Every structure is written in C-alpha cells, then in structure tokens.
Image (cartoon, coloured by chain):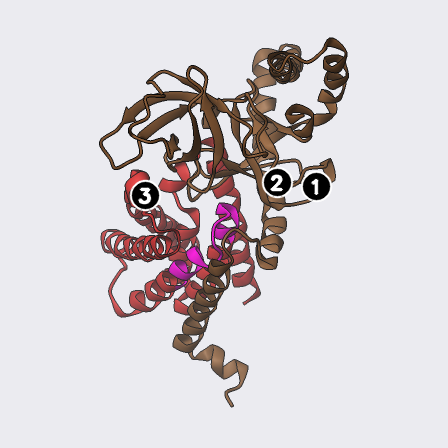
C-alpha cells in the first residue's frame, strides 16, 4: 500500500488521479441531464456570491465615477426614474394583456393590485461564460419567493427566459430563450401561427415544427408567447421573424430575432405569479 | 511553502475576480482572455508540473462554477495542460520570451482542443463555429502568461 506522501511524490500518478477525478465528475453529471447535483449546488452557492461581490464592486466603482462626473444628484434622480419606468412598463404590459382578454373592470383592478406582488425586480449579476446566450444569474432567489420555471422579462416587458436550476437563496439561474435548451410555446401576431421557439445558441431563435406547406408566418411578423406551455403567460413579446426558409425538409426554418439585447440587460423582472395572468 | 500557497491562492482569487469582471464588462471578453488558463500556465512553468496540475483542477472547477456548465469539463483540460506545461518546460528550453510564448501557445491550443472535444461529446455541438473569438484565446493566453512569467521572474529571480 502506497503512503499518501509517496503517492503525492509520484507526479504522474497524482496527475492521473486528478484527470480520473474530472472524468468521474463529468460521467456522474451527464446522465442526469438538467437535474442539478449536490456538488453543482454547493459550487453554485460558493461561486455566485464571489461573482456578485465582483460585479457589485464593479458597479459601485462605476457608479462612484459616474456620480463624480455627473454631480451625484443627477445620477440618483436618473436611477429613481429608471426604476419607476421599469415598474410602469411591467405594469403596462400586464395591463394590456388583461385588456386583450377583455376582463371586467373590477377584475382588472383586483388583478392590478396583485401585479406589484407578482413581479420581482432583479439585477443581473453574471453571465454564463461558456456561452453568454445560454444563461445568466440574477440576484434574487428562493428567499424572495422565486422557484424554477418562472418567466423573466427585460425592462421593456420583452421575454428573455425562465428561471432554472440551481435556485439559490439569493441567486437564481435564468435560462435564456436564445439557449438551445430552451423551449417556448409561441404564436405570430398576424396569422396566429403556433410553434415552439428555441434558441440557436448564437443570439437568435428558431420557431420549430411549422410545416413547409403551411402558408402561415411572414418575415417581419411579431412573435409572442401563446401560453400553451403553461410556463409563460400569453402575450409576452418575444421577437420578430427575420428569415423564413422552406428548403430544408418538411419543416420551415423560421429565424426570429429576439427583442431583448443581452448587453443591455441589467434590470429584469421575474413574473412570480403567472396564474394571475393565465387565469 | 506557506508563501507559495499564499501566492497560488491569491492568484486563483485574482483569476476568479478578473474572469467575473470581464464577463460583466463585456461577455465576449472571457472568450478571448481566459484568466484561468493564464494562471495555470504561469503556475506550471514557474512551480512545476504537480502544482500546475493541482492548479488546473482548482481553476477548472472555479471556471466550471462560473460558466454553470458540466463540472469537470474545464478542470480536465486545464489539469492535463497544466501538468504537461510544467513537465515539458523542464525538458525543453523555454527561457527566452519568444520560445516561451510559442510553447504556451501550443499548450493553450491543446487545452482548447481537449475542452472543445469534451464539450462536443457532452453537448453534441461545437462552440468553435459559433464563438470565433475562441480561436484567438491561445494567442492571448500565450502572450499574457509569458509576460507575467517574465515579470514574476524579475520580482523573484530564483524561479
């Protein structure tokens, strides 16, 4: 039996063991698919605060510099107004949806009262560095009432994705609609063409399973959520069709440019209570 | 020994902080500047293959935690490249800036190929098509790591 010191001195053996450890780690996770392992949860909980601290420090420094430049009051007022616009645009989005569904005034008022509680504003604290069109991290978690599969919108109310595992106490991963792992039930605004929207991993989306023979869908059409998947409420703006190709197989290749811009994502809204909108 | 440990831990913390900061400033920058890869190369060439491999494991796990991907993916490629960088740098003459840069470039390219290969095996897609900036990563790693080693040796001539 080799002693630990001797084992450590055998460099090739140590390196081999480390490589074996990684292979074991990979093979342990891969069959689980999207299920989160305990190790992932632990490392997520350890790394997310570090990332949060770095980003917050960066923001604080940038904020201090900006305040110095613009004379602090202007910057503060601007931030306050931005926050207000953010809430108002979310409220407006939900209000429009309610009107579209022709709810009675009383129902509308009662629903609007709950809107403030249903929307959780959050800040983006990190991106998936292996592919930034796949997911991001926000600074709200289970302590704020967040769970898996809640829709997330940008400040203009455009859909950006849904919450996904791991959900930490104060941090949550958001799976973006531009990710290949994502799936959203959508329809076009003009001819109500249904389809499943998925990301291409490069910043654009594809509407899948629309037959080549189908006359529906035109370039320039707006795409919104249909609500059929019971995850995303109907009527959330997703993007616009930029290209349709019928040459590849039995399904059309429909490319959608999402409305949200990943570089401008700082504040997002998590729709905590989608039942309110789906009802 | 304690000093070395302190330097390595500090290096890892700096790499994590810089990686997160780059990702926040401009997400595509992390494709070009892989601070973990730079750290592993510097550690391996300065301290040797064992430290390179161990740093590869630690830095790889940190990178995987930040990328929210499959754990072990970056660790595997960084451990292998860290060990090889340390081991080969003892066998070959990599003392001049030019030779060292070419040497690190080749190893970084190898590391990227191993990573991309396992990424393809797991996710069934290649990032090399969708993220062309990745091609420049070995060059950036080689230049920055080589400069850092030069600076490190100026401060600590015993290495």
Marks 1 and 2, Cα distance to the nearest angstrom? 8 Å
Residue under label 3, please give it: B134
Q: Quadrant of residue B45?
A: bottom left
Q: Chain of mark 3?
A: B
Q: Is label 3 in contact with label 2 (beta carbons under 8 Å)?
A: no
In the image, which lettered chain appears brown? A
Main SS class of the magenta portion in the image: helix
Identify the mark nearer the N-term, 1 or 2: 1
Q: Which residue is mark 2?
A: A172
Residue B86, position in %: x, y? 35, 65
Label 1 crowd (10 A; few <14 / some 14-19 / many >=20): some
Q: Nearer the viewer, mark 3 or mark 2?
A: 2
Colour red, chain:
B
Q: Nearer the viewer, residue B62 or B141?
A: B62
Q: In which quadrant is the C terminus of chain A drawn?
A: top right
Q: How many marks?
A: 3
- Image: A224 above or below B16: above
Nearest-to-viewer mark from 1 and 3 = 1
For label 2, count other residues whose C-alpha is less than 10 Å away and answer few (under 14), some (14-19) or many (20+).
many
Q: Which stretch did the figure color magenta?
A: B62-79
Q: Which residue is rendered at x = 58% and y = 48% of the image?
A: A47
Name which residue lies at 35% across and 61% down: B81
Q: Label 3 to label 2, Cα distance in Å? A: 27 Å
Residues at marks 1 and 3, CA–CA distance in whole angstroms: 35 Å
Name the residue at 50% across, 39% down: A135
Circle 1 sits in a helix, a strand or a loop, which is it? helix
Q: Chain of mark 1?
A: A
The spot of residue B31 in percent (x, y) is 37, 41
Is disc 1 in contact with disc 2, using a CB cutoff of under 8 Å?
yes
């Amino acid at each position: 039996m080799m002693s630990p010191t001797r084992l450590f001195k055998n460099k090739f053996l140590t390196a081999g063991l480390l490589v074996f450890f990684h292979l074991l780690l990979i093979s342990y996770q891969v069959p689980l698919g999207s299920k989160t392992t305990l190790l992932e949860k632990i490392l997520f909980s350890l790394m997310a605060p570090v990332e949060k601290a770095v980003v917050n420090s960066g923001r604080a420094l940038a904020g201090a510099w900006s305040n110095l430049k613009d004379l602090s009051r202007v910057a503060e007022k601007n931030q306050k107004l931005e926050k207000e616009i953010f809430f108002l645009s979310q409220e407006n989005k939900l209000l429009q949806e309610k009107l579209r569904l022709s709810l009675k005034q009383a129902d509308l008022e009662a629903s609007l009262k709950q809107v403030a509680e249903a929307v959780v504003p959050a800040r983006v604290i990190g991106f998936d560095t292996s592919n930034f069109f796949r997911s991001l991290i926000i600074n709200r978690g289970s302590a704020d009432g967040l769970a898996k599969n809640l829709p997330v919108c940008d400040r203009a109310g455009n859909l950006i994705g849904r919450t996904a595992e791991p959900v930490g106490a104060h941090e949550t991963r958001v799976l973006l609609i531009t990710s290949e792992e994502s799936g959203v039930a959508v329809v076009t605004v003009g001819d109500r063409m249904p389809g499943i929207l998925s990301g291409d991993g490069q910043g654009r989306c594809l509407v899948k399973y629309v037959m080549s023979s189908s006359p529906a869908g035109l370039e320039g059409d707006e795409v919104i959520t249909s609500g059929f998947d019971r995850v995303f409420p109907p009527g959330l703006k997703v993007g616009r069709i930029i290209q349709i190709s019928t040459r590849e197989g039995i399904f059309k290749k429909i490319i959608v440019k999402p409305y949200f811009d990943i570089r401008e994502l700082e504040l997002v809204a998590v729709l905590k209570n989608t039942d309110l909108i789906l009802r | 020994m304690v000093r070395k440990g302190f330097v390595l831990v500090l290096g890892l913390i700096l790499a994590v902080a810089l990686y997160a900061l780059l990702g926040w400033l401009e997400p595509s920058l992390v494709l070009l500047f892989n601070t973990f890869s730079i750290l592993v190369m510097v550690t391996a060439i300065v301290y040797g293959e064992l430290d390179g491999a161990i740093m590869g494991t630690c830095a790889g796990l940190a990178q995987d935690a930040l990328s929210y991907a499959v754990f072990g993916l970056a660790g595997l490629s960084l451990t292998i490249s860290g060990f090889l960088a340390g081991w080969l740098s003892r066998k070959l003459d990599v003392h001049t800036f030019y030779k060292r840069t070419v040497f690190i470039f080749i190893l970084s390219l190898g590391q990227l190929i191993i990573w991309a290969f396992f990424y393809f095996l797991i996710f069934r897609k290649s990032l090399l098509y969708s993220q062309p900036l990745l091609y420049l990563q070995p060059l950036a790693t080689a230049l920055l790591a080589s400069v850092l080693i030069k600076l490190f040796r100026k401060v600590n001539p015993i290495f």
